[in-house]
């Protein structure tokens, strides 16, 4: 089932999300719906607050990059109750976008290695170092669980320059191909 994606201005995107247990109702159906919603919108990651649920869960699919990076073929991961334990490697600048901020793309600096403790969809525990583009997506989605969005991490100057676009979103004006839930 395709769910509407909440856009900037929706209070849920600014809340710190809550951890869940393995008993969370209909968790597997929820995860399936999140993947479907993300795929339909051509996203590489989707966090639960983006579909209006303030819980610590996000999904990532890098399959759309598999033409260039064959290792990402059918690459899908679920992160439940993740904790970033360490950041490492080097700082890399790259343009990011977000399904909750349609029409905005800005360069964000992030470390290219991240050590994460999390549970997968079977509630199996993991503690691993993640690298490269995958590490960027993990950090972007993780921010959503703490009520942050990527434009919080750009320079004050850049933020000033895109103020008009942000204000339009905050007023509920979003233009995109996928189904959204704006403040209006
Ligand atoms: Ni996002």
Image (tube, rainbow, N blue to C red):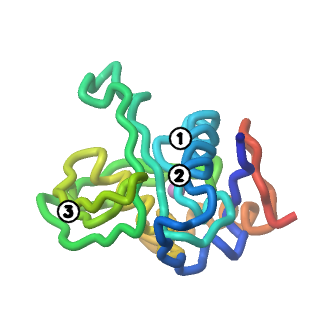
Residue at 19% of width from left, 67% of height from top? Answer: 87
Element on which disc 1 rests: loop
- Residue 144 in percent (x, y) is at 50, 67
Vertical placement of residue 28 versus 1, above or below: below
- Residue 31 in percent (x, y) is at 55, 49
Q: Marks 1 and 2, how far apart in space?
A: 7 Å
Q: Read off the residue under disc 2.
A: 46
The response on whether ligand 1 sits within 8 Å of label 3 is no
Nearest to N terminus: mark 3 or mark 1: 1
Q: Quadrant of the N terminus?
A: top right
User: In screen coordinates, is 162 left or right of 62?
Assistant: right
The response on whether ligand 1 sits within 8 Å of label 1 is yes
Element on which disc 3 rests: strand
Question: Which mark is nearer the camera, 2 or 3?
Answer: 3
Q: Read off the residue under disc 1.
A: 43
Nearest to N terminus: mark 2 or mark 3: 2
In this view, which residue lies farthest toward the left?
89
Which of 83/11 is in front?
Answer: 83
- Residue 130 in percent (x, y) is at 21, 52
Residue at 31% of width from left, 60% of height from top? Answer: 109
Q: Residues within 10 Å of mark 3 (few under 14, many from 20)?
A: some
Q: Read off the residue under disc 3.
A: 127
CB of mark 1 within 8 Å of CB of mark 2?
yes
């Amino acid at each position: 089932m395709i769910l509407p994606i909440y856009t900037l201005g929706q209070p849920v995107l600014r809340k710190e999300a809550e951890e869940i247990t393995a008993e969370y109702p209909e968790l597997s159906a929820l995860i399936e719906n999140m993947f479907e919603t993300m795929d339909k919108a051509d996203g590489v990651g989707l966090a639960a607050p983006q579909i209006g649920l303030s819980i610590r869960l996000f999904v990532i699919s890098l399959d759309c990059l598999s033409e260039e990076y064959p290792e990402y073929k059918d690459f899908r991961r679920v992160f439940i109750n993740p904790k970033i334990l360490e950041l490492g490697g080097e700082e890399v600048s790259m343009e990011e976008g977000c399904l909750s901020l349609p029409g905005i793309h800005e360069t964000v600096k992030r470390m290219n290695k991240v050590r994460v403790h999390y549970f997968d969809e079977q509630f199996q525990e993991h503690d691993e170092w993640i690298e490269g583009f995958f590490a960027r997506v993990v950090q972007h989605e993780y921010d959503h669980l703490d009520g942050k969005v990527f434009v919080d991490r750009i320079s004050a100057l850049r933020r000033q320059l895109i103020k008009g676009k942000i204000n339009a979103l905050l007023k509920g004006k979003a233009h995109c191909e996928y189904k959204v839930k704006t403040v209006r």
